[in-house]
Image: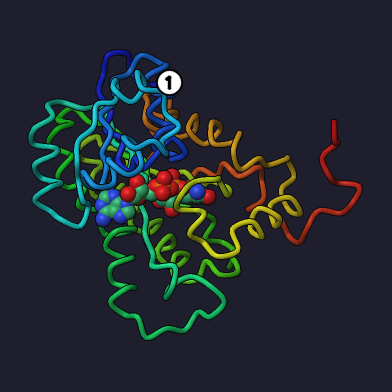
Amino acid sequence: MVEQGKTYVVMGLLDQDSIAYATGKTITSLGGNVIYTVQNERMKSIFIDSKRSKMAEDERAALNIRFCDITIQDEVVALFRDIGPIAGVVHSIAFANPKTLLGQELHTDAIDDIKLAHHISCISLATVARFAQPAMPKGGSIVAMTFDTKHVFPMYNWMGVQKAALEALVRALARRHGRDMLRVNAVSAGPLATMAATKIPGFSQLSDVWNKTSPMPWDPVADKQAVANAVVYLLGPNSQKITGQILYVDGGASIMGGTLMDYERPLQS
Ligand SMILES: NC(=O)c1ccc[n+]([C@@H]2O[C@H](COP(=O)([O-])OP(=O)(O)OC[C@H]3O[C@@H](n4cnc5c(N)ncnc54)[C@H](O)[C@@H]3O)[C@@H](O)[C@H]2O)c1
């Protein structure tokens, strides 16, 4: 539950499939105001304004969108300087060059790509916390998005490394900002059908892994709502003393030793 009438910044909207979009819609449905960030105007014109967008015209027009490239510190500073008081921020942003950092071979010479992936997918959370905190003078909540770092997945390679670093940063930021009454947590989601996911080679195999391991059925489309609900829980006052935590919303796959036995499989309706 979010606080009615309070404003939340949801960073990382690409299109109607984005986790950011599901989260923003959930916040709005609960009475919060949402400011979305999109990386730049080009992304908005391609993924939100063009005919390829599945968003209804009135829905699109109602979105309150700012532009922010997370690697440009001045843009982050300007965003949080100009928007007035807020109650929370969702960091739903990641990038790794799929040609060099994801796929069948882990080893790579593309060190600059790794640095860029680290800047966008990890360091940027610290930039956000640093410059968003003054907009939450009485405290607030930041929620980032991660993916199971307890296990090593095929092809996820250097993004898995970024997520492990991101989770360490969540804890470091929670320690740093406790004095500001600012909480920092992450939701670890199972595989969801989004643009970022389609860039992961073998994403459908990752979904198959979930079918074999998750104690509860997992749906990469429908379960986006379950993930958004958890983000909203961590954003709002019902999670008031929770900070530095990783909340798994993955059907339980992350706890499993091995795959499900036949007798453990979810009942099919
Ligand atoms: N889809 C999944 O299966 C899944 C599972 C667990 C965690 N996540 C995480 O959820 C988050 C959101 O991803 P998504 O799946 O909704 O995909 P998405 O493609 O809809 O969102 C990724 C966003 O990152 C943004 N981005 C990339 N570089 C940026 C930059 N320099 N500045 C600003 N924004 C930038 C993109 O523009 C895009 O809006 C990511 O952190 C992702 O790793 C996704």
Which part of the image, by quadrant, shows the C terminus? top right
Viewer-side residue, 245 vs 11: 11
Residue for point 26% across, 33% down: 9
Residue 60 relative to residue 181: left or right: right
Q: Which amino acid type is shown beneath numbered disc 1?
A: Met
Viewer-side residue, 179 vs 66: 66
Locate residue 50: give its quadrant: top left
User: Residue 143's spot in the image, x, y percent?
Assistant: 36, 40
Residue for point 13% across, 29% down: 83
Locate residue 46: give its quadrant: top left
Residue 143 relative to residue 229: left or right: left
Q: Residues within 10 Å of mark 1 (few under 14, many from 20)?
A: some
User: Residue 91's spot in the image, x, y percent?
Assistant: 33, 44
**Relative to 208, is 24 above or below?**
above
User: Residue 96's spot in the image, x, y percent?
Assistant: 39, 65
Residue for point 24% across, 47% down: 42
| Badge 1 element | loop
The colour scheme applied to this rendered structure is rainbow
Residue that lies at the very extreme toward the right in this rendered image: 263
Viewer-side residue, 171 vs 129: 129
User: Residue 244's spot in the image, x, y percent?
Assistant: 38, 46
Q: Is mark 1 within 8 Å of ligand 1?
A: no
Residue for point 31% across, 39% down: 142
Is residue 267 at least partly visible in the picture?
Answer: yes
**Relative to 190, is 19 above or below?**
above
Locate residue 14: give its quadrant: top left
Residue position marked by numbered label 1 in the rendering: 1
Is residue 245 at least partly visible in the picture?
Answer: no
Which part of the image, by quadrant, shows the N terminus? top left
Viewer-side residue, 26 vs 132: 26
